[in-house]
Amino acid sequence: MQNLTGIVHFEDFAGQQFERLCFAYLLRRYADRQVNWYGQLGADRGRDIVCTKPRAKALIVQCANFRRLTLAKARTDLAKLAKGQESRGAQFLLIAGGAVSGALKDKIIASAIETGFSSADAISGPEFEESLRVHAPELLSRFVDGVQFPELAAELAVFTQSGEESSDDEIIHVLALQFDRPAFRTHFHQESSLPRFKEAIAETIKTLNTGETPQGSRFPSRHQVRDASKRAALDRLVGLLVNLRAVFDDALRTGAVKPCGCNVPDCPTFFVDPRAGYELDRRRSEILSLVRTLDAGFVGAFY
């Protein structure tokens, strides 16, 4: 593990990675608020993250991961923010990855107030680092150690917590997201790679069992779900995946599914007996239906 006592140079990291860290930090810092990550969606009108709470002023957060933040850049982004209805009377927070002088901080705060915010603050990279050490030290450790932060907000929400802090529904929701991929939601005759189809099954089994994703992120696993009936359903889900893999292996062995013969590993052309294709689709439909019973928000249907 790298030494965390030295200065962390946030400005050396990609903007999207820094934004994900800010989002994870705010989830921990403002656990009583709804934290929405707009930067991941594009067309964010300058608002990267918005924290809201009933009968309370919204907190609009701008993530500025620049080696040298300028007042002109901050004012340009504030002008964009001013066009949003939720900005009126809201609080404003700028989180910088690099250094922010006291004079620049004062000017940014004054500009935000002039724009219409009720209050404002700007914190520099070193200040952000110290706040992380106090409120979410494990996130800083993961960030410095190079652990890949998840891309999706729902996954990040669970990534910021330990298994004890995550509810059963939160854990299941993230595990359900692992089934939103072509290997499970594309009719078999439309599959583009036989090796990747089998790899996807193995990867999903591993994520369910260990919480580790192919990208290196780690979440609570099915074993950390407390409700016995839900845990039993997840056990059955793993069993269905194992059976799906066995049926696929048997189809390859018997020739019911076979490559075209060009010897290119990822060739999208292969031959499939209609009965084998039907059986693979049927078994995946059963898997998707079970996932949908566990997570009502999951869209369990073929594309």
Image (spheres, helix red, strand yellow):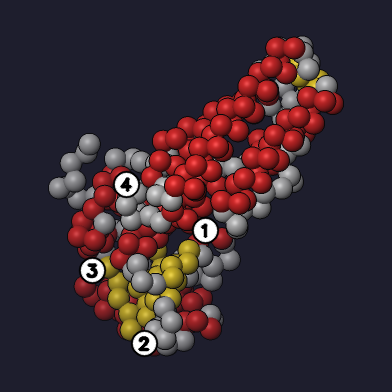
Q: Earlier in the sequence, mark 4 or mark 1?
A: 1
Q: Is residue 303 above or below residue 214?
A: below
Residue for point 57% across, 61% down: 42
Q: Is residue 228 above or below residue 215?
A: below
Residue for point 43% across, 67% down: 35
Crowding at dot 4, Cα within 10 Å, few <14 / some 14-19 / many 20+, comes out as some
Q: Earlier in the sequence, mark 3 or mark 1?
A: 1
Can see residue 55? yes
Residue for point 44% across, 42% down: 222
- Looking at the rendered structure, which numbered label has been put on residue 101? 3
Q: Which residue is disc 1 drawn over?
A: 40
The kind of residue on which mark 4 rests is: Phe
Single out the mark in the foreground, 3 or 2. Answer: 2
Residue that sits furthest to the front in the current view: 229
Q: Is residue 253 above or below residue 295?
A: above
The kind of residue on which mark 3 rests is: Ser
Q: Which residue is disc 2 drawn over?
A: 118
Which secondary structure lies at badge 4? Answer: helix
Q: Which residue is disc 4 drawn over?
A: 143
Where residue 118 sits: x, y (%)? 36, 87
C-alpha distance separating marks 4 and 1: 18 Å
Would residue 27 appear left or right of 185 to someone viewing this image? Answer: left
The kind of residue on which mark 1 rests is: Gln
Would residue 228 appear left or right of 99 to someone viewing this image? Answer: right
C-alpha distance separating marks 1 and 2: 26 Å
Nearer to me, 12 or 239: 239
The kind of residue on which mark 2 rests is: Ser
